[in-house]
């Protein structure tokens, strides 16, 4: 596909609300002034994603649905040599992350205020070294499950943009959703689950800052799981 050709219409993976409470004045200012500087253009293929960052990072990581942005901001601060993409359609979550970016002068984050699938389709193959999907909406009712972000088709789209050996990190406090994801990953030809013992899914990852949703889950007595999958190095990109 020529690099200037527009991408085909995206396959929609976005469900749920886009706006919440009215933004405060400083949040509104950040949305007007800072967000355009950090936004990624996904109307056409991104030929050189590292070039979107001033420091040309050695690796690119993606967080899909970052909520209030506390994990993404902490991760970007801990790993200044990594370029981070964050996708979140919820306006209030974007505003909260922008405040953290502004306060901490984080220059290694780029954002998409839209469906993450649009970024996945715009990125070149094997461009991501890590992907986070943390506490996505479980859509618990049976008729809603087709809205869940993780599906066989989505795993194929993720596999295309992930490097061999790249990690897909998934956290949830909903047992049914954990089982749903495991079922689909284990039948995928593109990912493996290199688990050895219960600590591999019951204990958070090193330097884990947590999320606001995780704190709510723990306070309610729910026990999260932390699943790490690896892009199969033997699979075809």
Image (spheres, rainbow, N blue to C red):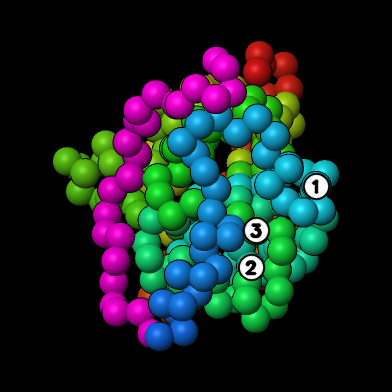
Image quadrant containing the N terminus? top right
151 vs 83: above or below: above
Of residues 222 and 171, the one nearer the viewer is 171
Corner quadrant of residue 207: bottom right
Identify residue for label 2.
Answer: 73
Which portion, as a residue range, is magenta? Answer: 1-24
Bin the neighbour count of mark 2 within 10 Å (Cα to Cα): few under 14, some 14-19, many 20 and up: many
Give residue 56's mark.
Answer: 1
Of residues 188 and 103, the one nearer the viewer is 103
In this picture, residue 197 sits left or right of residue 67: right
Identify residue for label 3.
Answer: 109
* Overall secondary structure of the magenta section: loop
Q: Which residue lies furthest to the left in this view?
A: 143
Of residues 16 and 229, the one nearer the viewer is 16
The residue located at (35%, 79%) in the rendering is 23
> Whole-percent x and y of residue 195?
67, 39
Mark before the other along the chain sequence, 2 or 3 = 2
Please check the rendered image and state whether residue 113 is part of the magenta-colored stretch, yes or no: no
Label 2 or label 3, whichever lies nearer to me, is 3
Bin the neighbour count of mark 1 within 10 Å (Cα to Cα): few under 14, some 14-19, many 20 and up: some
Q: What element carries label 1?
A: loop
């Amino acid at each position: 596909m020529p690099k200037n050709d527009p991408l085909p219409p995206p396959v929609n993976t976005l469900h749920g609300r886009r706006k919440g409470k009215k933004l405060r004045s400083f949040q509104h200012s950040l949305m007007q002034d800072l967000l355009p500087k950090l936004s990624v253009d996904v109307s056409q293929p991104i030929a050189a994603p590292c070039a979107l960052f001033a420091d040309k990072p050695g690796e690119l990581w993606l967080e899909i649905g970052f909520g209030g942005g506390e994990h993404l901001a902490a991760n970007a601060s801990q790993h200044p040599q990594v370029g981070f993409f964050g996708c979140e359609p919820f306006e209030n979550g974007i505003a909260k992350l922008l405040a953290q970016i502004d306060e901490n002068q984080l220059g290694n984050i780029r954002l998409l205020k839209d469906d993450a699938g649009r970024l996945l389709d715009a990125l070149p193959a094997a461009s991501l070294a890590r992907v986070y999907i943390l506490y996505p909406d479980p859509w618990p009712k049976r008729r809603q499950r087709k809205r869940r972000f993780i599906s066989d088709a989505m795993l194929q789209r993720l596999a295309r943009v992930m490097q061999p050996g790249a990690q897909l990190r998934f956290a949830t406090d909903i047992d049914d959703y954990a089982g749903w994801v495991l079922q689909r990953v284990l039948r995928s030809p593109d990912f493996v689950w290199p688990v050895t013992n219960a600590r591999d899914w019951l204990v958070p990852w090193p330097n884990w800052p947590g999320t606001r949703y995780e704190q709510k889950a723990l306070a309610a007595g729910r026990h999260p799981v932390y699943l790490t999958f690896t892009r199969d190095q033997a699979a075809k990109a």
